[in-house]
Structure formats: C-alpha cells, structure tokens
C-alpha cells in the first residue's frame, strides 16, 4: 500500500500518510493536515519557498519505521541529494582551496625557496597529507566526484517539483488566497459587461508580456497569467553546464599533453620537454610530437629600441616556424596572445632565453685601399655579398664580447660590448674570420682589415637568443568552453528573467448592494515571482494602473 | 486605484504607499555621470597634457566620496531631505571624478608611450591599438575601477528611494579603496606584453565591476544584520579581532613584539625608479607604542563585550564602549604620527632596525641570484655584515614614502574606519534600526546583489580561463589569484544555496555574503602582496 518513490516529495508524503493508517496506528492528525496544506500551497510559492517547504515537508512527515533496506537506501540518497550536503561539500572545497593558496604548491615558481624555509615536521605533515599538490590529491578528486554526484541527484530530486510548477497551473483563486500573495491589490473598473472587463484585464496583462488563461466558474471570472515559466528550468541548465566543465576538466587532466620547445633560428625539433614536479626536484621528460618544427626567424618588438630585451620593454614576441610532416610544409608565425593551431596542437609563446642577440646587424664596410664605405645589413644566420663578390656570413653575435680560449664568447647577456662575428670569403674562395664592433675595445688587436675590408657594427635589431614555444593538445577544452558558454547564458537567464504569475478574480462590484451601479467590477489581483521581488511588484502595480487606465506617475 | 470596496470580513492589505514608478528617469544620475565623464575624456584629448592629471581627479573623487558619506550618515540619524540631496549630489560627483580620472589615465598612458616612440623617431603607427593603454595594468588602475564599480552600483540602487541610505556605508568603503590607491601610487608603468590582449579590458573590467557590486552586497549584509537585531557589541568584537590581526601583522610583527613600527624604505635607482626594501625598515618614533596601546585596548574591548554578551553585565558593556572610544583616539593619533613623520623624517640610515639585517642579507643574496640552498649555508653573521655594509654605503640615499607600504597603511586606516563605524552604529542603535528598510526588502536586495556578484564572478573566472588558454594554453592552473576568485565565487554559491537549504536562510545566509566579500578583498590584495603566482603584476 505504501507508495514511496525516491525523489518525489509529494508522493513521499502521501505514502507516509497511507503507511501510518495502514499500520493501524493512531493517525497523527496535525501532521497530515500541515503536509496537505503544503502540497496545496506549493503551487503559488516562489521556487525558494517551494524548495524550502519540500524540505520542511520531508521532516514534518514521520519517517517510516520499517527496517528493510529500501528506506536506508532512500535515506542515503536523500542525504546525497540534499542541498545541505552540497553546501557542506562546497565549504570543504573552499577550505582545501585556501590551504592550496597558503601552502605554496610544488608547481609554483619559488616553491624551492618556500620548501627550504619549512621545518622537517612541517615537510612531513604537509607532504604526507598531499598538501604540496592539494588540487591533485586523491581526496580532492573524490570531493569533486561526490560534488558532481550531489549536483546530479539534487537536480533529479527537484525536477518533478519544477515540472509541476510549470505544468500544474492553478487556474482559479479565492479572494483570501489572492490577498495572501507577494503582490496584491484590488481595483474597480467601470465596464459594460463582464466580457469587456475580462478583456481589459487580459489586454493589460498581455501588454506586460503575460499570457493569460481565462476560467469561468460559478458566475465568476478567473484570469491566470504568467511569463517566463521556462525560467524555472534554468537551474538545471546551470548545473548541466557545470557538469560539462567538470567533464572537460577531467578529460584535460587525463589526456592533455603540453611541453616546451626552445628554438633559435636554424634549429629544428620534433619533441617537446614536459616538466614533472616533485617535492625537491623538477625533472624534464621528452615527449615526441608527430611533426618537426623548424625555426626560421625570431623577432622581439621593443618599446625602447636601445633598451633591454626584458618583458618590461617588449610589445610582442614572434617566432616564424616551418612545420614539416608527411602532409608537407606549413609556414606559421607564433606571437604572444596570437597562438597558432596545427593538427590539434596549439603553439604559444611561453618564454624566452634572456641572452642578448641580434635579428639583423647593420655593418659599415670600408675598403682598405680607399674608396666609398658601404652599409650592409646581414640577417641572423644569413649572408650578404659585396659588389666585388666578397661574401659576408654572420656566424654569431656576442652582446658582451670576450674571447674564451681564442673563441668569441660573451661575458653576460647584456648589450655591454656588442660584436658581430663574421666569416669573410673573398671572390677567390679564401675565408677568414672578422669581428665588427660597435666601439673598439681598448688595446684590442682587432680592427685591422680582413680580406681587403674593415668592418664596423653600426646598428643591430635586438632579439633574444632563443624563444621558448609551448605546444599543447587538450581534448577537454571543447567541453570546458561549451560549459563556459552554457554557464554564462544560463546565469544571465537566471538572474535577469524570472517566472512571474498573476491571478485575477473579476466579479461584479457589491453584487448584494442594490444601490451600486450594475456595470462596475472588482478585479482582485494577486501574484508572485520566483526572483526579483521588487521588480515584480513594480510591474504588478503598473499592470493595475493599466487596468484602471491610470498611467500617470505617482509623485512622491 | 486603491480598493474602493471591501468584502465584509475579507482581509485586503492596503497597498503600501506608492513608491515612485521606476522609469528611465530614475537612473538619470547614473546616466549623467557616464555622459559627463565621456565629456571629460574628450576634453583631455582636446587639451592634451595641459589638462588636469588623473591623480588630481582621483583626489577630488575621494573628497567627494567622504563628503557624501558624511551627509548620508547625517541623514541616517537625523533624516533630512536636504542632507540626503547633498549626499546624493556629492556621491554622483564622486563617481563622475572617479570615472573621469580613470578615463584621463587611459589617454595619459597612450601619450606616454607615444612620446617614447616619437623620441626614437618612430612613427605613431607602430603604437599598439587603443586597448593596449586601457588603465587595467596594475593595482592602482584596478582600485580606481573597483571604487567606481562600488560608487556606480550605489547610484544605480539609489533609484529606489528606500535604499539611498546605503551610500552611508558603501561610499566610505569606496573612499578607503581610493585611499589605498593613493598609497599604491599613480605611476604609469610599461605594460607586460602578456597583458596586451583584448581579453584584458573584458576580464579586468568584469573584475572591477563585480568587486564593486560585491562591496555593495557586503554593505547590505551589514545593514541586514543590524536590522535583524545583531548586537553592535558582537560586531565590535569582530571589528576588534580584525584590528588586532592587522596591528599584529604590520611591520613584520614588530608592534607587539618590540613595541616598534618600522616603515619600509625606498632605494632610488639610477633610472629614476624607486626600489622598495621591505626588510630595511626605519623605526618611526611613538607609532609602535601607540599602535600597541590601541591593540591592547581592542583586547579589552573583546573581553568586556564578551562578558557583556555572555552575562549581560552592564558594567562590562560600559567599559567596552569606553575602551573602544579610547582605541579609536589612539589609533587616529598613531596614524597621524605615522603619516606626518614619514613625510618629514630625514637621515633614514641611522634609524634602521638592525633586527632585520639578517633577513635583508638573505634578500641581498637572492638578488645575486643565489639558490635557497646556497643562502641557507651562509652564516647569519655574514648575512648581517653584508647588510650592514649595504646600509653603511647606501644609508644616506634611502628615503621614506607613504607608497612603500600601501596595504599596511590602508589596513590601519580600514581598522580605524571599522572602529569608527561600530561606534557610530552603537549610537542610538534602535533609532537606526527603525530608520532602515524592512528586513524582507533588505533580504531581497541582498539576494539580488549577491546573485549579480555570483554571475559576474562566474564571468570573471570564465573570461580569465579563456584568456589564460589563449595566452598560455591552459585554462586553469590553480594559480593563487584564480583560486582566490574561485573561492569567493564558491562562497557566493554557498550564499545562494543556503537560502534553499533548510535552516540556513536569514542571518546565517547573510554571513556568507559577508564572507564572500572578505575573500574578494583577500584575492584583490592578499594574493598580490602575500602569495606568489601568475598574477603577481596585479
């Protein structure tokens, strides 16, 4: 005889009452009376109140005393699907997130410095509890899982109530009931007959976007009107969007790949290095990618052209690459904030190696035997040929020139003493090394002519030694983005629209009073909304004004 | 249109005496402020660098907010249409100057880079597009926008006459944010290239507006609790705890430990910039003992009000109020002493606290790019002597500035303000309660602003995630700032859900609205100043 269906409070209440009577116990008179009231009234309450009452209903109804397994399961499900459990879990997530903020996480820059300041017992405690990587700890994942479960169950639990609110429309209402609503009012209108009065009410409601249903009963006219009933469903959409994001996050955590690829012009790579964080160590793992990336040019657009190549002085970095695979060759430019997509991989500018270099050098080349000096520009790794056939190859660029074991080198990464190292090849094929300085170092044994020319570095375009590209492949991203758009859309819907309902009872004014003119009607109105109460009240009173034809603003 | 005939025995509630209809005109102040600020922007473009600097406009905005707050408070205690009108006008002016300052700063940032380019003989066409210069580059910019968000939301809510009083709480808070901005300093810096994205105005714009709405939501929460009958003494205990936390942590804990307050020094760099040396703190005479005294009085406040709340002891209540007033006066003196001495003190090198030399020595070693392991092996005596050598060589060059400790100073002023407000609220509290709108109206507005904050924080997180994905290829990295915003968002989520969870609505629900804002402040300041991470620039 017991009808006890999970997730439907109304059925559950009825089930409880029946159960009590069937068991032959003295029925608790007051409890069913209250719960029945709850059921009847549910139709006109706001979502919040309705939800509250459905919970209160759960409690006021006596719990079944049977010991079989079904109620236990029900109780577990009740707990898992309760808002309180959700709130409790959210608070645990908040707590763990705060721990993750206060205890520096092991993938954060500066972790080694922080770790060095901890006492051995702190290291053991935090490490043992997984708090150096709290967002990837098993308990955090478990929490997200139970939270997802809670969202799903709570949504299922509420769906029937929501559906009843949307579909189970109350078409008639008594005066007393109307006057107990959130917004209430009674207006009188002079009208030729009842139909005209009804049309006036329906017309006014329509003007404010309400769709009306008219019911005639016992000589009285009832108008039920509502707008935005779909808004009751948006909470479902919000939670579906959240779950979509969670799913995407799971896919990312499981299947995403990313790694770095440092490149200087002329270099090529077919693997990326992935960082793996441990407590005391950061190790690199090389991961192969299905194509080869060859760097052809790197450029750094600076604010102050003669300033440092630091991030502060940079407008943009870009790397020009050639991607080679079985499908052929593709040219691409990767700039900061302008990533490039290829075969599911995304190329980003990740960082750069802070060692001064030059994208091009401008040289003043003076013939040893007299004659006009000429200015030539040589690109990085490139060459140029003078009029007489002498070829200049730019072998390297040293920002702070020095010689180490006879080989050109740099003392620092700064442009303190920039020099271009050239290979000069005469038309006859003889090759020699030459240096071009911006200003000659004192007592330097250089500056003599090499193969008939003297070389001076007049200018150069600053660029760093290497750019580090990051490559990432993330199959979860699509889900996450989908969830994002769903969330934004539905949150807007939730907070900027609401389900508003208005009931009106139209009856001839003072039907018993023979003195009163027969063509006056009373319109008793009541209405409620699930959200934006004050906005609804404003609208309600505007509708009243529209019915009476009084549209003037009330001066206060 | 009122009920002209009533059925016998039927209960027909009379419609509450009509509030004015909401029309576009109700929003006129907000609209006028936006238009007038746009005009200021055009004037700045027209007049160029000769126009008022943005920092001056900000100071005017601050003065307006303070004036408006005073008139709003006056109106709350002694209702007067005149006071309210002056309050609303000055609030409007404050928002106008606030927004103008921000807009003028946009042009100023453009002009600055234009000059750099022109001085190198490069064409203006090489400059970035206009959104590169939008003032959302550091905490100063964000604070300006945050205060605007709060002021503007106050103006919007003021379209309901019932809620005009809110300015009494939101405007002082907005003023505090501008005070913080003043301490941070209005210098325009070169933009980090990673920030040069069209996502920046979207993401940071949403941040500042959502923070502003959250501030208003917080204020409504406080008012709700007052209206709901929460004892002012209980609020005083919370305010005193907050005050104690601030006093105990400023100046690296030296106030209670050594009865000293040390202000951070600046080391002037050759290129004109100033490097803050947070470990080299100069002792500011009298400030440490004064703050410690204020702190001890706050402990007394907690004890006295604790006894009063537990045992309803009227003597304890009386003493609690006395101590609270005393603490207010002492705090005010301490801040006055601090500000005046920081501005006038000379010969900083001789006033440094040698207790910090070891920590400073470590910092110097870090600047030499030594690893934590290497630094750990340096004996303390070497670190101290290294620091002493630096001080001997550079002590005379060090300078003091209010900009060196923006958060500490702003926190001290916030404690002072909180103390002041608790005292104001404790004055004729019943009368104040009666002057406030009905509890359900406050609850409705609390829910509305809380919901808007929740939605906007969601957008903040989403736009941040999309931007991060476009720049770094990862949409979520649990960086402290994003985690902070996430925590605040969750807290507002809890706030919304407590309303439908049994037994949590009403006062308890309001506590979550307050907590959410505290997390926002933590995200906004704490993360930037206390925790490492990707958002270290702002």
Image (cartoon, rainbow, N blue to C red):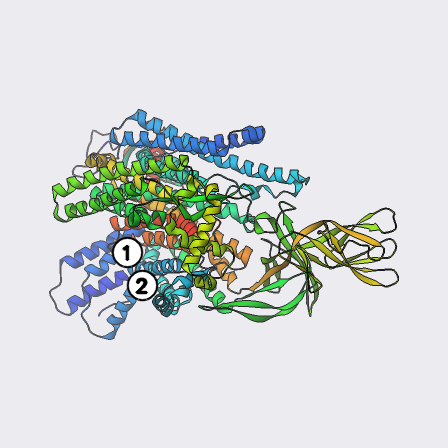
Please give the name of the residue rendered at 36% of the width and 63% of the height, measured from the top-left corner: A147
Question: How busy is the neighbourhood of tag 1: few (under 14 within 10 Å), some, or many (20 plus)?
Answer: many
Give the residue at mark 1: B501
Q: Quadrant of residue A51?
A: bottom left
Q: Chain of mark 2?
A: A
Percent x, y for residue B173?
Answer: 35, 39
Q: Residue at x 61, y 49 (%)?
A: A308
Left-right relation of B488 to B185: left
Work out whether B474 lies above or below B83.
below
In depth, the one of A404 and A328 nearer the eye is A404
Circle 2 residues within 10 Å: few <14, some 14–19, many ≥20: many
Instruction: Determine which residue is flagged by label 2.
Output: A81
Choose top left, top right, bottom left or bottom right for residue B384.
bottom left
In this view, the residue in front, A78 or B528, is: B528
Q: Is label 1 in a helix, a strand or a loop?
A: loop
Q: Kindly tell me whether residue A34 is visible in this rendering.
A: yes
């Amino acid at each position: 005889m017991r009808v006890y269906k999970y997730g439907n409070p109304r059925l559950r209440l009825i089930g409880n009452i029946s159960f009590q009577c069937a068991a032959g116990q003295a029925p608790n008179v007051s409890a069913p009376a209250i719960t029945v009231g709850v059921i009847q009234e549910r139709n006109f309450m706001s979502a919040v109140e309705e939800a509250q009452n459905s919970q209160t209903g759960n409690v006021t109804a006596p719990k079944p005393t049977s010991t079989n397994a079904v109620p236990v399961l029900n109780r577990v499900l009740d707990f898992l699907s309760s808002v309180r459990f959700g709130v409790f879990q959210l608070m645990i997530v908040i707590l763990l997130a705060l721990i993750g903020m206060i205890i520096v996480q092991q993938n954060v820059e500066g972790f080694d410095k922080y770790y060095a300041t901890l006492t051995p017992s702190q290291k053991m405690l935090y490490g043992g509890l997984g708090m150096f990587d709290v967002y990837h700890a098993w308990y955090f994942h478990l929490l997200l899982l139970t939270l997802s479960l809670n969202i799903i169950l709570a949504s299922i639990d509420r769906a029937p109530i929501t559906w009843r609110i949307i579909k189970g429309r109350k078409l008639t209402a008594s005066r007393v009931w109307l006057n107990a609503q959130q917004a209430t009012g009674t207006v009188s209108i002079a009208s030729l007959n009842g139909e005209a009065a009804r049309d006036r009410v329906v017309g006014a409601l329509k003007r404010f976007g309400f769709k009306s249903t008219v019911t005639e009963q016992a000589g009285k006219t009832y108008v039920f009107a509502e707008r935005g009933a779909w808004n009751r469903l948006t909470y479902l959409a919000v939670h579906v969007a959240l779950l979509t994001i969670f799913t995407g996050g799971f896919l990312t955590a499981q299947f995403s790949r990313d790694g770095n690829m440092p490149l200087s012009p002329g270099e090529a790579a077919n693997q990326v290095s992935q960082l793996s964080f441990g407590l005391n160590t950061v190790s690199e793992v090389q991961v192969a990618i299905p194509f080869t990336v060859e760097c052809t040019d790197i450029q750094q657009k600076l604010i102050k052209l003669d300033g440092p190549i630091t991030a502060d002085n940079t407008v943009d970095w870009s790397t020009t690459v050639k991607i080679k695979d079985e499908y052929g060759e593709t040219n691409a430019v990767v700039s900061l904030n302008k990533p490039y997509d290829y075969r599911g991989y995304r190329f980003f500018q990740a960082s750069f190696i802070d060692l001064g270099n030059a994208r091009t050098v401008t040289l003043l080349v003076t013939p040893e035997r007299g004659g006009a000096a000429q200015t030539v520009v040589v690109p990085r790794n490139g060459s140029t040929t003078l009029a007489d056939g002498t070829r200049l190859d730019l072998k390297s660029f040293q920002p702070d020139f020095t010689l180490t074991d006879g080989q050109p080198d740099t003392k620092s990464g700064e442009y303190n003493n920039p020099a271009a190292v050239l290979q000069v090849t005469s038309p006859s094929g003889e090759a020699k090394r030459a240096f071009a300085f911006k200003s000659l170092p004192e007592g330097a044994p250089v500056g003599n002519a090499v193969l008939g020319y003297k070389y001076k570095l007049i200018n150069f375009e600053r660029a760093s030694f290497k750019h580090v590209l990051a490559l990432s492949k993330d199959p979860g991203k699509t889900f996450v983005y989908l969830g994002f758009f769903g969330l934004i859309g539905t949150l807007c819907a939730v907070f900027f629209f609401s389900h508003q309902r208005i009931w009106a009872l139209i009856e001839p004014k003072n039907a018993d009073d023979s003195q009163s003119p027969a063509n006056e009607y009373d319109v008793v109105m009541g209405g409620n909304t699930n959200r934006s109460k004050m906005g609804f009240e404003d609208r309600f009173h505007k509708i009243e004004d529209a019915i009476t034809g009084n549209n003037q603003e009330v001066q206060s | 249109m009122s009920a002209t005939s009533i059925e016998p025995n039927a209960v027909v509630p009379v419609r509450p005496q009509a509030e004015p209809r909401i029309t576009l005109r109700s929003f006129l102040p907000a609209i006028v402020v936006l238009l007038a600020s746009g005009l200021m922007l055009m004037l700045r473009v027209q007049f160029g660098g000769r126009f008022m600097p943005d920092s001056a406009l900000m100071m005017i905005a601050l003065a307006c907010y303070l004036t408006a707050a005073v008139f709003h408070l006056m109106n709350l205690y002694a209702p007067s249409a005149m006071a309210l009108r002056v309050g609303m006008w000055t609030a409007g002016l404050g928002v106008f100057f606030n927004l103008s300052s921000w807009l003028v700063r946009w042009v100023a940032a453009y002009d600055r880079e234009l000059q750099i380019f022109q001085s190198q003989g490069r064409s203006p066409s090489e400059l970035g597009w206009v959104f590169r210069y939008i003032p959302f580059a550091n905490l100063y910019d964000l604070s300006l926008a945050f205060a605007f968000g709060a002021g503007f939301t106050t103006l919007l809510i003021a379209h309901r006459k019932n809620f005009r009083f809110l300015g009494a709480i939101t405007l002082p808070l907005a003023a505090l944010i501008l005070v913080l901005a003043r301490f941070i300093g209005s210098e325009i810096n070169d933009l980090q290239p990673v920030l040069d994205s069209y996502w920046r105005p979207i993401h940071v714009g949403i941040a500042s507006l959502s923070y502003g709405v959250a501030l208003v939501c917080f204020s409504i929460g406080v008012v709700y609790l007052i209206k709901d009958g929460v004892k002012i003494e209980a609020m005083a205990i919370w305010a005193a705890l907050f005050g104690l936390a601030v006093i105990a942590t400023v100046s690296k804990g030296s106030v209670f430990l050594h009865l000293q307050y040390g202000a951070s020094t600046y080391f002037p760099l050759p290129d004109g910039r100033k490097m803050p040396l947070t470990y080299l703190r100069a002792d500011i005479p009298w400030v440490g003992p004064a703050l410690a005294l204020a702190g001890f009085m706050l402990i007394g406040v907690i004890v006295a009000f604790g006894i009063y709340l537990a045992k309803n002891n009227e003597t304890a209540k009386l003493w609690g109020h006395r101590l609270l007033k005393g603490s207010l006066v002492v705090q005010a003196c301490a801040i006055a002493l601090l500000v005046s001495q920081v501005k006038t003190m000379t010969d900083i090198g001789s006033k440094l606290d040698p207790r910090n030399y070891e920590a400073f020595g470590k910092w110097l070693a870090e600047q030499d790019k030594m690893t934590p392991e290497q630094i750990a092996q340096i004996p303390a005596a070497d670190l101290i002597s290294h620091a002493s050598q630096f001080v001997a060589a550079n002590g005379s060059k060090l300078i003091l500035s209010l900009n060196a400790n923006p958060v500490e100073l702003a926190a001290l002023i916030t404690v002072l303000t909180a103390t002041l407000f608790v005292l104001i609220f404790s004055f004729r509290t019943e009368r104040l309660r009666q002057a406030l709108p009905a509890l359900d109206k406050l609850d409705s507005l609390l829910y509305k602003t809380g919901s808007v904050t929740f939605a906007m924080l969601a957008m903040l997180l989403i736009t941040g995630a999309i931007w991060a994905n476009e720049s770094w290829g990862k949409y979520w990295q649990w960086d402290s700032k994003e985690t902070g915003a996430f925590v605040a968002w969750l807290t507002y989520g809890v706030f919304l859900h407590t309303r439908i969870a049994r037994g949590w609505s009403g006062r308890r629900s309001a506590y979550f609205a307050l907590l959410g804002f505290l997390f926002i402040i933590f995200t906004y300041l704490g993360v930037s100043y206390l925790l490492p991470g990707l958002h270290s620039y702002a």
